[in-house]
Structures are given as C-alpha cells and as structure tokens.
C-alpha cells in the first residue's frame, strides 16, 4: 500500500438518499395523496352512497309529480308488488316527462356530480405538506 495523501480532495462528495415512494399515502414523496384510515374511507363511502340515493330520490320520486304531466291512462303501466297488490313506490311511471323535468333533472344531476367530484378532489389533494428538507 502506498502512502496516503493528507491533501483534501477537490471533488465534493454527494450524499444521495433513497426514499420510499408509495402509490397512496400522506408522505411528501408519495405519488397520490390519500389518507388511508378506515374511518375516513368508510365516511367517504357513506357520503357517496348518500349522494347516489339523493339523486335517485330526486329524479324518480320528487320531480315527476312536480314537473311531469299526468298520463292519460295511468293503468297502462301497472306496477304490481310481490303478492300481486298494486304499489305506488315510484310515481315516475305515472307521469309523462316534460321539458321542464328534463332541464331541472339535468341541472340537479350536474350539480350532484360536481359535488361528488369536488369531494373526491378535496379528499385526494395534498393540502400543503411541508417538504422534508425545508428549514425555518
């Protein structure tokens, strides 16, 4: 072995760190921002279920009596229950749909879809995490 030089080397050494880059998580280096706790995901599922039920109820139950024209012969489309008795669970079938129903229904579904999309974007967007190498 030869003698060691005590002179400092001219090339600085670089330190390279490896980070774990997960697909979903709340870390700075994670690809997609999503908090994977069980309670939050269950609440998000309930929220989407409530939006779907609300859209169903408005389009099939609330709007037809308000904005639909009653059919001339409502018995033309009979609705029979399990035991053969007449049921009126969905008054949608007793009405001819009007232009006003189409416009209001479309606007409601558009706003409901935008609300669901906004919730999803808020749930999966980084709210402003601090980079790990930031200094005060």
Image: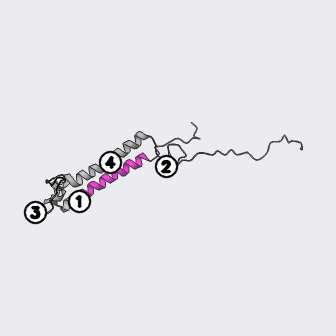
Instruction: Let me know if residue 113 is in the magenta part.
Output: yes
Secondary structure, mark 4, is: helix
Badge 4 or badge 1: first in the primary sequence: 4
- The residues tagged by marks 2 and 3 sit, at their Cα atoms, a distance apart of 55 Å
Badge 1 or badge 2: first in the primary sequence: 2
Badge 1 or badge 3: first in the primary sequence: 3
Q: Quadrant of the C terminus?
A: top right
The answer to which of 5 and 48 lies nearer the viewer is 48
> Would you call the spot at circle 2 few (<14 residues within 10 Å), some (14-19), or many (20 or more)?
some
- The residues tagged by marks 4 and 1 sit, at their Cα atoms, a distance apart of 24 Å
Q: Disc 1 marks which residue?
A: 103
Instruction: Let me know if residue 109 is in the magenta part.
Output: yes
Q: Nearer the viewer, mark 1 or mark 2?
A: 2
Can residue 68 be seen by looking at this rendering?
no
Q: Disc 4 marks which residue?
A: 49
Residue at 73 percent across and 45 percent down: it is 13
Q: Disc 3 marks which residue?
A: 73
131 shown above or below 78: above
Q: Disc 2 marks which residue?
A: 32
Badge 2 or badge 3: first in the primary sequence: 2
Q: For the stretch drawn in magenta, what is the main secondary structure?
A: helix
> Would you call the spot at circle 4 few (<14 residues within 10 Å), some (14-19), or many (20 or more)?
few
Outermost residue on the right side: it is 2
Region in magenta: 105-127
30 relative to 116 in the view: left or right: right
Secondary structure, mark 3, is: loop
The answer to which of 115 and 9 lies nearer the viewer is 115
Check contact, mark 4 vs mark 1: CB within 8 A.
no
- The residues tagged by marks 3 and 4 sit, at their Cα atoms, a distance apart of 35 Å
Outermost residue on the front side: it is 83
């Amino acid at each position: 072995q030869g003698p060691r030089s005590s002179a400092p080397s001219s090339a600085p050494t670089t330190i390279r760190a490896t980070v774990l880059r997960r697909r979903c998580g709340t870390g700075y280096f994670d690809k997609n921002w999503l908090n994977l706790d069980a309670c939050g995901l269950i609440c998000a599922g309930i929220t989407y279920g409530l939006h779907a039920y609300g859209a169903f109820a408005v389009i099939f139950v609330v709007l037809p009596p308000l904005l639909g024209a009653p059919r001339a012969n409502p018995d033309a489309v009979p609705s029979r229950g399990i035991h053969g008795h007449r049921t009126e669970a969905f008054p949608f079938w007793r009405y001819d749909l009007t232009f006003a129903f189409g416009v209001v229904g479309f606007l409601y579904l558009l706003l409901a879809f935008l609300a669901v999309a906004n919730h999803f974007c808020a749930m999966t967007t980084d709210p402003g995490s601090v980079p790990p190498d930031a200094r005060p």
